Image: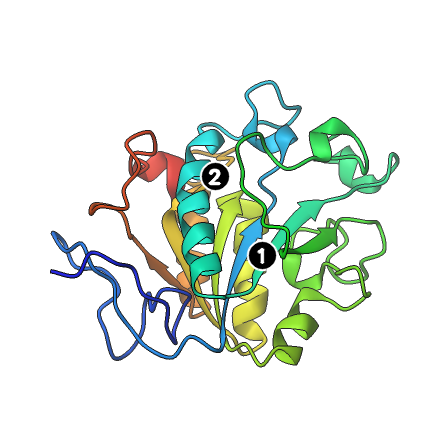
Amino acid sequence: MNNNIDLGRGGMFGLGSDDVPAYTEGSNSVMCHSVERDALVVVDVQQDFANPVGSLYVKDAEQVIPVINMLTAEAMRRNVPTFFSRDWHPENTPHFDKWPVHCVAGTPGAGFANGLVVPQSANIVSKGLGLEVTDVDGYSAANGTLIDGSTLAEALRAASINSVTVVGLATDYCVKATAIDLANAGFYVTVVHEAIRAVNIQPNDGRDARRAMQDAGVSIVKILGGVFAPKQAPAPSESQAV
């Protein structure tokens, strides 16, 4: 059996594709074709969220890092564009009326998490700048901006990308908002189950977020279990990831 994860239409690795099953219990292979229009979007894997001493730590968030690194390495091997979003808040924002102060632009807590591999070629997407009109909390990376001022959605369209794999933090806020916004914008969106974690202010928030994404047409898939499964990154429980 071929143990490689191949990129393809319908998600970065062909996950959720119409022509090839995304995940089969007991299978080590995810296969599809045509890599030209795929992208990987890594949402907000930052110190304040993924480090246990961070100001807004998401439980078990550090476990997504080796999974995301695996996906990033495969993307780089296949010349698939990568986009890494970050909360980049001003010191004073109404957002902090809802949440503890976190990811203030230029502070250590806003840096990408320890151990996360961010390729030199990665496109950095900043959000939560306080400039958003419709998404005032800056949850959605789709509305975040690249260094040239374009939004993530605009950059994806400019690169003729039509399918996106979304991973990161947190399932019930920024991952959900990003995935739904991109799906509503016409992209085929796949979320990788093992590469997300939820805040879960309420016990079922992550599960409800997954259902909301699926209702918006987002595919949520599992990819671990074969040779690519890092020992330090077990598949999350229902309460942790969904």
Residue lying furthest top: 53
- The residue located at (34%, 34%) in the rendering is 233
- Is residue 229 rendered to the left or right of residue 174? left
Characterize the local packing of mark 1: few (<14), some (14-19) or many (20 or more) Cα atoms within 10 angstroms.
many
Which type of secondary structure does the marked residue at label 1 adopt?
helix
- Relative placement, left or right, of 3 versus 38 is left
Question: Is residue 214 positioned above or below 10 on the image?
Answer: above
Residue wearing tag 2? 198
Residue 8 circle label: none
Question: Can residue 160 be seen by looking at this rendering?
Answer: yes
Where, quadrant-wise, is the C terminus in this rendering?
top left
Q: Which mark is residue 177?
A: 1
Q: Nearest the camera: 206 or 11? A: 11
- Residue 208: percent from left, percent from top: 42, 49
Q: Amino acid at mark 2?
A: Ala
**Depth order, front residue of 221/38:** 38
Label 2 CA crowd tier, 10 Å (few <14, some 14–19, many 20+):
many
* Residue 138 at x, y percent in the picture: 72, 51
Q: Could you tell me which residue is drawn at 22 percent across and 69 percent down? A: 21
Q: CA distance from mark 2 to mark 1?
A: 13 Å
Q: Position of residue 78 (x, y in %)?
A: 43, 65
| Tag 1: amino acid | Ala
- Upstream in sequence: badge 2 or badge 1: 1
Would you place residue 170 above or below residue 141 in this image? above
